[in-house]
Image (tube, rainbow, N blue to C red):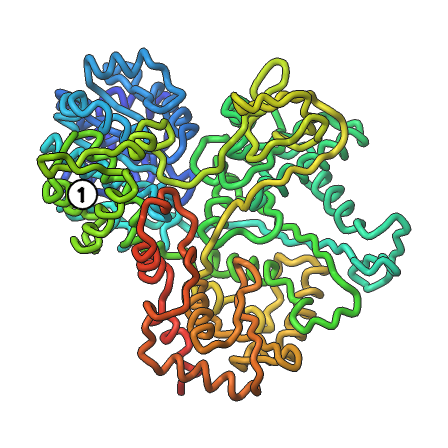
Amino acid sequence: MMNAFDRLAPFIQDFIYQNKWEELHGNQVAACEVIFDSDDNLLLSSGTASGKTEAAFLPILTRLYEQPAASVGVMYISPLKALINDQFKRLDLLLEGSNIPVTKWHGDACETGKSRLIKRPEGVLQITPESLESLLTNKRGACMSMFSDLRFVIIDEVHSFMRDVRGLQLLCVLERLKNLTGVNPRRVGLSATLGDVSLAKNWLNTGTGRSCAAPLFDEGKKRVRLHIERFVNYSDKRDFVERNGSMNVVNDSSGGDIGDREHYDYLFKQTLDKKTIIFANSREEIELVMAHLRETALRSKAPDVYRVHHGNVSALLRENTEDEMKSTQEKIVTGATVTLELGIDIGSLDQAVQIGAPLNVSSFAQRLGRCGRRGQVPQILFTFVESLKINSSDTLGPINWEFIRTIAIIELYLREHWIEPIPPLRHAYNLLYHQTMSVLKSSGEMSPAGLAQAVLSLDCFREITREDYKKLLGYLIYIDQLQKTEHGGLVIGREGEKIVNSHKFLTVFLAPEYLLVKDENRTIGTVDKVYPVGTRFALAGRSWETVDVNAKSKVLFVKPVQGISAVDWDRDFDVDLHTVLVRKVRSVLQGQEEYLYLSERCKERLNEIRYIARGSGILEHLVTALSDKKFAVFPWVGTRQLTTLHFALLQKKIKSRRLWGTTLYLEVVFGGTKEELETVIRDILKSDLDLYGLPLPDKVQLRGKYNEFVPAELLRKQFIEDYLDFEGLKEGMEVYCN
């Protein structure tokens, strides 16, 4: 039997020789076996920089080389335009001598290439979900010829699509394309961070009727270098102090920001002459950190190697940063949010830095995977800056939950190899609206029955009833999104035309209204609010002052200024905490282990937090008294389960609130005793709780584009079915029911 290498096309073998590969990776061999010897879909889940992309393309391009397609043969779908641009360069090199062309198709791609592909469809197409939706909606006829012989669809960073409605949009569009062309291409999904492979296989298979292979292979034991450091700001203005590891007091006469200053000096020293990504969870924070590092470098007469990379920095500046990071000569330090979590090639890094806690285990895995490429041991540094009130009377206030959550995340990923599973969304009514309008725009007038058949037959909507769809259509007619014709058919109404003819229609995720920021020579990026003339703000790691505002064209004209400025962004990220992660937090608090990656300051802080947690009773008791009528309820369950309990308590007329998005407990105001409150909660757990009877606010549904076109009762149903979990709550709190 021929080995995997011998089965590859000659131009691929030449590429492997030229690049001096010693052998194919395990995932590449496994991918070859599935692609060459079966008709299954393929899910490849392996670590960052493990060669997943090549694993998919090597056998697929071999198939395309041996049996050329009569249309586009391979479609590569990416969540990011930047990832498409990056993969385009890599594919261009791989395809030398193959006569297989590759075409980029997204909003910034060359129109000449797109026109050429329509006239002569062939080779590999790289595209985003939104661009594919646009093709299907606006060029239906062209799609029939472009994809008449489509063999493979490669979906990169599958986990990022599975998280939200954008992934459902992609599945809908692929299924509509299949229905239009009669072609059912094999799907290949790629990811480095999948918590539940079976969920991912089900997602990838949606609408295909195929089985999915998910080969397992030993990636070997990985070494990781970790370190967590802590800094403190004290907010008692009578006594600004910082305590070192020996608990000696060091006075600071300049004020209470000593921790911040120490933090920036520490980051400067740790990143000096090291190619580094610094991750933060918000654009505001990363802009501030990078501005301070640049100022520190200026004082130290060090070179300015500091860059910022997030979604509101202009594409040109982001691409320049990516190119600089790829360079082996430049020791660039880049501040980023989630934009550099995904698989854009940035070469070898010396280290990654995480400020504060990662969003979750999956996010940590992605960020860790950014460093340690090219055979290096991954190195990641965590830093925390705490603002503490001396002699605080708040029982739980001294507990730094982010710090403990970070330890829990590290332990779950590195020791237990666990990543959050991604539960499917089954009642995405806002997407149902979007696909209804897209189908009508593509097809023209349709009967209500024909429209229902075209939309509800899509596998993503299999749990949505015809009755619910009838309610949606009735509401859309009422608000003039749809219109009934004299023949009883449905067409897009006057108000609907305003939506579907907008360039923003193609996106299904909610994004703020952005304003362009320009200086004399270039576009700097975008902001989500107007900064009046004379106002200073931060963007792309620098400070700017507004010199003019063009309200009509929504452009801010700016000039660069010295100093550090703040920027006030709207909320960046929502994240659900999984029950497994929450319980790991409790395990860290209950344990005695001294984690080797903690600094001395952090070890002291961990012991202090453990002492407070044990003394407060939160680790053993469901309810802990905070004051006379205020209690903390610790069920130690995930976000969705905790939210369910919150509304169940409100139904009992008991005031409950979650203090912040990633909180682990409820703060409850109750006129009775601790024991009486525990009894109420146990009674809830033993009941047949009717989720539809809960006192949900009118706008309880999570933020979502097109929610305004969905009847309130359907939004309420969506929230109940997809964002509450009573069964999970009962299971997680079973110990309290006995």
**Above-or-below relation of 183 to 394:** above
Q: Residue at x 30, y 14 (%)?
A: 113
**Above-or-below relation of 367 to 396:** above
Q: Residue at x 58, y 17 (%)?
A: 522
**Above-or-below relation of 576 to 204:** below
- The reply, left or right, for residue 567 in relation to residue 114 is right
Instruction: Determine the secondary structure under disc 1.
Output: helix
**Depth order, front residue of 645/563:** 645
Q: Amino acid at mark 1?
A: Val
Residue 33 on image: x %, y %: 20, 40
Residue 692 in which image quadrant = bottom left
Q: Is residue 479 visible?
A: yes
Residue 172 in which image quadrant = top left
Residue 353 on image: x %, y %: 60, 44
Q: Residue at x 74, y 24 (%)?
A: 561
Residue 382 on image: x %, y %: 62, 50
Residue 323 on image: x %, y %: 52, 23
**Depth order, front residue of 715/489:** 489
Q: Residue at x 52, y 71 (%)?
A: 656
**Depth order, front residue of 304/686:** 686
Q: Look at mark 1 in the image and give the residue it sits on.
A: 455
Residue 535 in which image quadrant = top right
- The reply, left or right, for residue 143 in relation to residue 545 is left
